[in-house]
Image (cartoon, rainbow, N blue to C red):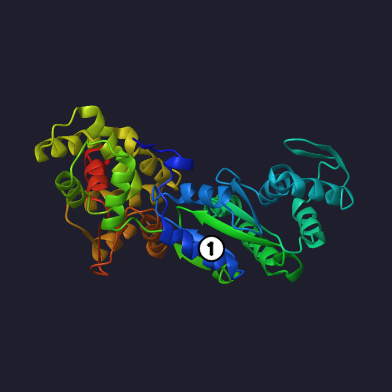
Amino acid sequence: MKNIVGQVATGEKFFNRKNDIRKLWGKIRSGSNVLISAPRRTGKTSILYYLKDNPEEGYSILYLDTESVDSCNEFFRKIYNHLLTESDEQLKIKLVEMAKTLGKKIDEVGKTIKLGDKELDYYEELVLLMKKLDLKDQKIIIIIDEFAQTLQNILKDDEKKAVSFLEKNRTLRQSPDINKNIQFIYAGSIGLENVASSIDGSKYINDINSHTLRPLNREEAKELIKFILDGEPLINDKTIDYILNKLHEFVPYYIQIIIQEIHEAGFSGTDSEIDTIFEEIVKKRIYFEHWHARLKSYKSNEYKFAKTVLNIASEKEFVSSEVIYDKAVEFELNSDHKAIINALIYDGYINNDENPSTYKFNSPLLKMWWCKNVAN
């Protein structure tokens, strides 16, 4: 089978979501900088790796994850180093030679760049380098994964620094001397729009072309299951339909762990066995603990509020806006609670699609897990 759980799927294990890939390349070819918004575990990073490993002619693509970055200078240092060490060989030589003639003196070029001046402003160095580039018929696409998390990390330290960070990134995108050669793709599982709006920073990202990576539709989910099975007669079409009816939301990760559990259970083909497998998945904290762990990074009262809202939604059919507001007052959040609810939506927990005033879990599987392992 081609089942890879919780890791980036590359090469022959990558399930090609052709519609999303087609739309993304259309936006790239138009010259847009792109924001990919994706709930957790929808296959975002695998798609980003696919773009990196399969660039169209005339494009060179770099990928970096900045989830742990918590300062503006460190963010631009990573981009600077990545350009000079991870570009294709011919471009790397050109960039290094160019960098040596600009700004501060480069002492060493290896896996990282060592410069003579330790107190270096990497944003200024990056601007100098990018403005000097002349790639003629080639463009560099820089993919920055978990960009919104980086913004949130900086925001925890200082709001003014977070606003400055957004301003500097917009300046890079808007400079004609830079965008003729370089485009950016930002991605993340928490909503950039939500974080930016919390500091009145929406105006600094309104130039980015947005693409939402959604869970699979039913036909795509069937195709993924058959792709994973790769001809192995583990389950038939009837069982596939039963699984999808129970899942309701077709997140690739959910499908992968179900197929893994079926394979390990010695499945004989009954619906009751599928029910048992769902129950076994719910008992295993490891499958969904990272959802809960992300919430623990909130401030104490924010975490308690988010946890309480999800507890209610997991124990009942839904949680109402009135109850949410009452809990916000209880935890002294007032209007700030709206940003937390939006974060839970972006993160793939809940939605209010059917009724604007009620929120329910997107996934019955995640709801069952939360109810058993967190709420009780």
Q: Is residue 243 left or right of residue 374?
A: left
Image quadrant in which the C terminus is located:
top left
User: Closer to the camera, 264 or 223?
Assistant: 223
Position above or below: 266 against 325: above
Question: Is residue 237 something that shows in the picture?
Answer: yes
Residue 203's spot in the image, x, y percent? 58, 72
The part of the image, by quadrant, that contains residue 270 is top left
Residue located 18% across and 42% down the image: 236
Residue 185's spot in the image, x, y percent? 57, 58
Image quadrant in which the N terminus is located:
top left
Residue located 27% across and 54% down the image: 249
Residue 231's spot in the image, x, y percent? 29, 39
The part of the image, by quadrant, that contains residue 34 is bottom right
Which element carries disc 1, helix, strand or loop? Answer: helix
Q: Is residue 298 left or right of residue 159?
A: left
What residue is pinned by disc 1? 25
Position above or below: 106 against 171: above
Q: Is residue 346 left or right of residue 184?
A: left
Residue 238's spot in the image, x, y percent? 14, 47
Question: Is residue 195 something that shows in the picture?
Answer: no
Check disc 1 and give the amino acid type: Trp
Q: How many marks?
A: 1
